[in-house]
Image: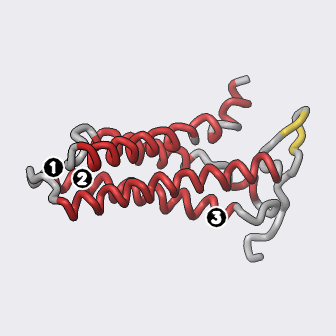
Amino acid sequence: MLNEVFAHIHPIFVHFPIVIILMAALYDLFFAILHKKAAPKGNWIWLAAFLSAWVAIGTGPGQDARGNTNIFHYHDNLATLTTILALVILAYRVFFRIKSKAMVRQWLAISTILSVLCAAGILSVGYFGGKMVYDQGVGVKVHGKYVNPPKNHDKDH
């Protein structure tokens, strides 16, 4: 039982960055529109967003997709880009916090745009991950056998 859980740990973790990044972006958007300032607790939410995205990437079973999907590179590259963007947003916000300065309108706009782009990125990551699982059967087992087993290719190809 425990082996099965650890063999499929990625699907357990992937939902956290989706929810946290969407919450963080909505929180930022809400404060930017209604209060004309950066969200006061946003740094903690973006820290959780970055860490959860990093863990989700680390648990990704890329070997399951080897040779049997044409969209893994989109999923993988978007996940990496979105995680880096979450880190950039966190660093941007911490910079202003350390400097003890409120974000002026243009800096707040940049922060909000980056937040919305990060939300779009994580939704795209989820879209391609879902296509691999539900349309192409990547990593899916029925009665202990892969529906679409990984293909053995040389690393040179």
Residue tagged 2? 93
**Mark count:** 3
Position of 69 with respect to 50 (left or right) is right
Residue tagged 1? 97
Mark 2 packing: few (<14 Cα in 10 Å), some, or many (20+)?
A: many
Task: Residue at 48%, 57% (x, y): give it.
Answer: 82
Position of 150 with respect to 57 (left or right) is right
Task: Residue at 53%, 52% (x, y): give it.
Answer: 122
Colour scheme in use: secondary structure
The answer to whether the residues at label 1 and label 2 have Cβ atoms under 8 Å apart is: yes
Task: Residue at 21%, 44% (x, y): give it.
Answer: 35
Residue tagged 3? 74
Q: Position of residue 57 (x, y in %)?
A: 55, 50
Mark 3 packing: few (<14 Cα in 10 Å), some, or many (20+)?
A: some
Q: Which one is earlier in the sequence, the residue at label 3 or at label 1? A: 3
Mark 1 packing: few (<14 Cα in 10 Å), some, or many (20+)?
A: some
The Cα–Cα distance between marks 3 and 1, rounded to whole angstroms, is 34 Å
Q: Where is residue 10 in the image (x, y as percent from the top left)?
A: 63, 41
The Cα–Cα distance between marks 3 and 2, rounded to whole angstroms, is 28 Å
Secondary structure at numbered mark 3: helix
Question: Looking at the rendering, which quadrant does residue 6 occupy?
Answer: top right
Q: Which of 155 and 150 is in front in this view?
A: 150
As shown in the figure, which amino acid type bears the numbered disc 3?
Answer: Tyr
Position of 69 with respect to 75 (left or right) is right
Q: Nearer the viewer, residue 60 or 135?
A: 135
In the displayed orientation, state which residue is furthest to the left: 100
